[in-house]
Image (cartoon, grey):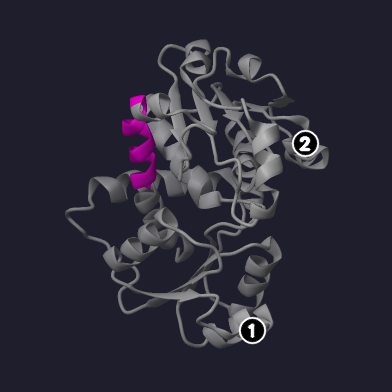
Amino acid sequence: MKHLLKLETLPRTDFEKILGDTAVFKRERNQPKHQPLAGQTWALMFSKQSTRTRLSFEVGIRELGGMPMFLSAVDIQLGRGEPIKDTARVMGRMVHGAVIRTFAQHDVEEFAAYSGIPTINALTDDEHPCQILADIFTYQEKRGSLEGKIVAFVGDGACNVANSWIWAAAKFNFELRIAAPKKFQPAPELLKRAGGHISVTSDLQAAAHGADLLYTDVWVSMGKEAEAKERMQILTGYQINGALVKLAKPDALVMHCLPAYRGNEIDEATLEAHADTIFEEAENRLHVQKAILNWTLT
């Protein structure tokens, strides 16, 4: 039994195992041979709204032979203040695994510690490990290894997706350039802890120059709605658009974890020009999720 709680502690060998299995699950989707979740029920506990994460895990669990059970915060006693450890000890006696999408990283880790069942972080304020695994798989599928390449992350460089890219860069030996205004740059202690070839700048043109991959995320993440006006003012201009793409390598990929707010972090024309990659990236969440689920049981 394994947990996927954060990329920070995921060994590169496990990264590679999940990515390798992803290719198999994608290739064999229409000829299912492996159903490791047969007879199992997995709980999806989501305190945050979701499209891609919920779809990919529900479909993935079913395709692996299991039964997904979706539980929002209003469906269970957590929404009324029951401690995570109590919920975990109950669920650990009734279901076979849990996928948790919530705010605090500590909640996912505490659930794993007390439940005794495989636990997957489907997004917290600290990290979004499933997304970055799908992103790396998508790049490998289209361009090969990321090792030695340049990834430019544009926008809110202190969000969970940027954090997860930081840990991936440290493990996969690629250069990560984060272009963000000073207020939304990653914490220096995080960068120091991660190591790797990572640079932070407020100059998005410099970050994009010669990049192999341009990447962005929403300016206002879930839970940050009260800061929306300030964020929009400060982040205006930190956008992937045609002019920025021209600074990257001619065959550079443009990716977005979605949902996309056209006209903010990416313009309409650029998103549509790279829609095949962006929506393949979204589809790959399903295949990666299946590989993660399978990995937790090995």
Q: Position of residue 106 (x, y in %)?
A: 70, 65
Q: Position of residue 120 (x, y in %)?
A: 53, 63
The residue under label 2 is which amino acid type?
A: Lys
- Is residue 280 found inside the magenta-colored segment of the image? yes
Residue at (45% x, 78% y) in the render = 96
Q: Position of residue 179 (x, y in %)?
A: 66, 26
The dominant secondary structure in magenta is: helix
Q: Secondary structure at mark 2?
A: helix
- Depth check: 257 or 260 in front? 260
Range drawn in magenta: 273-284
- Depth check: 125 or 68 in front? 125
- Depth check: 145 or 90 in front? 90
Earlier residue among tags 2 and 1: 1
Residue at (69% x, 82% y) in the render = 83
Which numbered marker is on residue 194? none
Identify the residue position indicated by label 1 in the image. Answer: 80
Q: Secondary structure at mark 1?
A: helix
Q: How many residues crowd around disc 2 within 10 Å: few (fewer than 14), some, or many (20 or more)? A: some
The CA span between labels 2 and 1 is: 34 Å
Identify the residue position indicated by label 2 in the image. Answer: 183
The residue under label 1 is which amino acid type?
A: Arg
Residue at (62% x, 54% y) in the render = 6
**Given the current orientation, which residue lies at the most extreme left position?**
31
Residue at (58% x, 13% y) in the render = 209
Rendered-image quadrant of the C terminus? bottom left
- Is residue 171 found inside the magenta-colored segment of the image? no
**Up-down relation of residue 254 to residue 8 (above or below):** above
